[in-house]
Image: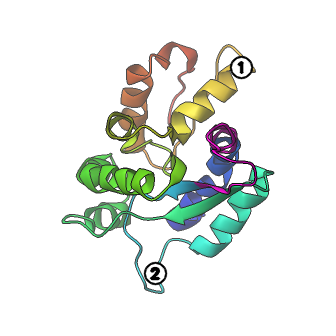
């Protein structure tokens, strides 16, 4: 399975838990009966109108809305506006060296898009990337819920067991994943094992 397939499948798998949570958050934000609550499923990179695009946003949006189960909640796939350095993720991804640098470069654009979502009537934002880029900063910038799928998946898994294992597609993701686990106070719930 190539990197793009892993990313596409990761979006689908992590979207399930986050979509369910966002749907319940959006349902609680309803101002009037029958109001459609829109949830922005925010990709970490700008939309590229090329054949090399990582996935088809329309098919992902359809899949996410099938998880939602609420006729009053609509999940929409969105992208940050183009920003300086947005090609870094593709360049280091092609080298299988993704280490979080692309997420750091994207933070201002992601937070701007979260503010845009709030200003345009969205009830919540879900960060579509499994490393939660922009989630913490976005929570400081907006009043609507901002949900990260990494933290959501971790807490969901930990309701079922005391210890879990995490797999990452690239060796360069290992230190980044551990940094996030430490930041979330969850590292002691993860079993370690050799990478090879």
Q: What is the x, y in percent for residue 125?
A: 50, 48
Q: Which residues are magenta?
A: 21-38
Q: Residues within 10 Å of mark 2 (few under 14, many from 20)?
A: few
Q: Residue at position x 39%, y 51% from top?
A: 114
- Comparing 76 with 95, the one in front is 76
When the figure is inspected, residue 185 is found, relative to residue 38, above or below; the finding is above
Numbered circle sitting on residue 52: 2
- Comparing 140 with 46, the one in front is 140
**Which of disc 2 and disc 1 is earlier in sequence?**
2
* Quarter of the image that includes the N terminus: bottom right
Q: Is residue 15 visible?
A: yes
Per the image, label 2 sits on a secondary structure element best described as loop
Residue 124 left/right relative to 111: right
Residue 18 left/right relative to 34: left
Q: Residues within 10 Å of mark 1 (few under 14, many from 20)?
A: few
Numbered circle sitting on residue 159: 1
When the figure is inspected, residue 136 is found, relative to residue 70, above or below; the finding is above
């Amino acid at each position: 399975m190539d990197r793009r397939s892993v990313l596409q499948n990761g979006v689908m798998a992590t979207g399930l838990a986050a979509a369910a949570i966002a749907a319940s958050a959006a349902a609680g934000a309803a101002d009037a009966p029958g109001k459609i609550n829109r949830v922005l499923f925010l990709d970490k990179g700008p939309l590229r109108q090329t054949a090399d695009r990582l996935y088809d946003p329309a098919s992902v949006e359809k899949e996410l809305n099938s998880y939602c189960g609420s006729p009053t909640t609509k999940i929409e796939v969105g992208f940050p506006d183009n920003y300086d350095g947005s090609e870094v993720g593709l360049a280091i991804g092609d080298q299988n060296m993704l280490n979080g640098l692309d997420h750091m470069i994207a933070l201002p654009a992601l937070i701007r898009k979260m503010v845009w979502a709030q200003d345009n009537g969205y009830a919540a934002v879900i960060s579509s990337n499994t490393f939660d880029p922009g989630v913490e900063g976005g929570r400081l910038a907006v009043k609507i819920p901002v949900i990260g799928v990494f933290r959501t998946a971790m807490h969901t898994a930990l309701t079922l067991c005391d210890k879990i294992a995490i797999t990452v597609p690239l060796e360069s993701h290992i230190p980044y994943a551990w940094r996030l686990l430490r930041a979330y106070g969850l590292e002691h719930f993860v079993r370690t094992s050799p990478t090879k």
